[in-house]
Amino acid sequence: MNNQRLYLIISLILNLFALVLFVDAFNKEPEADYSDEQFELFDIDYDYIPKSTKCYVNYATDLAYMKQSIHNFYYLRNIFSNFEFKYIVYYNNFTPSQDILTNPLFDFIEFKNVPNIIKNIKNTYYKLSMNKLHIFNEYDCDKIVYFDSDSVILNNNIDQYIDTASYDRVAMPLSYWDNCDSLSSALIILEPNNKMYDDLVNRIDNMNKPDMDLLNLYFSERIGDCFKYYKNALQLPYNTICITDGSDLRTDHFKNEHNDFEYDKMYCEGSFLLHFSLYGKPWYGSKIVQSTNSRLKELYSNVLYFHNNFESIVKSEESMMKYYGKYDYNILYFLLKE
């Protein structure tokens, strides 16, 4: 009797298990056919994937500055092969010729006529200098390397610093020529930030000082007479840029502390660019062009030649490359001469 009951229980369990398997098999969907005929691979359109846009930006207040922007941008793109960058030249205060704006050799450059940010500063130089603040509102770019157009490119080494800037932090070199550790606005690496733009513009008010003073006031905490503590600003190495304004030929400061060779060797080796500050611009009659002992003479003379012969040099790619062949030699001469 007990054996019969055990048999019935086992039989019932087995029948229930078989019923469960049957129902599961009945409800199961057929396997998909992943053969070439039945399955089509999703085609990704890479044009719709966001790309980071890196930009070089200059600002020109007259024709000479625009020529120098073209000089530097052509060198960066076609000699150093920086094709991944976008190139933008802001300009105002003058009207460039259509021969420049429509030259096919410069079709990689976007020329933007920008308005004056502020109008109530009496000093024209200071008023125009504030227009470089447009870079903080330049949302065609994700990363921006801004440098003053009155410069020449020495090396293709600024890429290593481009990621040092972020949305809430700029990167600028120290103005080593200043008695105080100020940040130099001759080179600024940043990500556009309209809040920073609004803050800076609102601080201008009737400030009768250039953009560099404004940026230092915004990004620095003042201690005594000098700026010592920087907030939201990374200090680039001191030799990211080097500067010359003919001071080594003119003022007691450089006559006492540096001779021409030592000054260049100390601050210009490894620099991304050489900045023609103040009166030391080749196209404005710098004394260095006439100097007999300056290591800068050949470089200055080469840049002056570009400006004086601009129309003939920019007529063709061949004439441009011929010019840059000599310019390259003078860059090496400047950097390596002992």
Image (cartoon, helix red, strand yellow):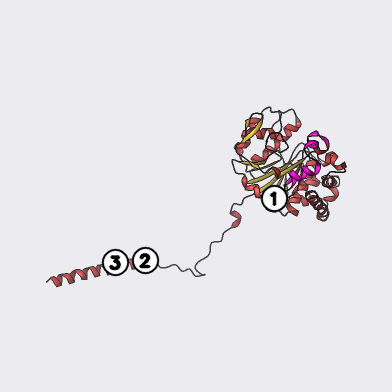
Whether residue 241 is visible here, answered yes or no, is yes
The residue under the point 78% across, 47% down is 71
State the predominant SS element of the stretch in magenta. Answer: helix
Identify the mark nearer the N-term, 1 or 3: 3
- Residue beneath disc 1: 157
Q: Any magenta on residue 271? A: yes
Identified by mark 2, the residue type is: Lys
Would you say 338 lies left or right of 46 here?
A: right
Q: Where residue 44 appears, x then y in whole percent?
A: 57, 59
Whether residue 300 is visible here, answered yes or no, is no
Q: Where residue 141 appears, x then y in whole percent?
A: 64, 46
Would you say 42 lies left or right of 255 here?
A: left
Residue at far left of view? 1
Q: Secondary structure at mark 2?
A: loop
Numbered badge on residue 28: 2
- Image quarter where the N terminus lies is bottom left
Identify the mark nearer the N-term, 2 or 3: 3
In the rendered image, which quarter is residue 221 located in?
top right
Q: Any magenta on residue 60? A: no
Identified by mark 1, the residue type is: Asn
Between circles 1 and 2, the one closer to the viewer is: 1
- Residue beneath disc 3: 20
Would you say 39 lies left or right of 5 here?
A: right
Q: Nearer the viewer, residue 207 or 252?
A: 252
Q: Where residue 6 appears, x then y in whole percent?
A: 17, 70
Q: Which residues are magenta?
A: 250-275
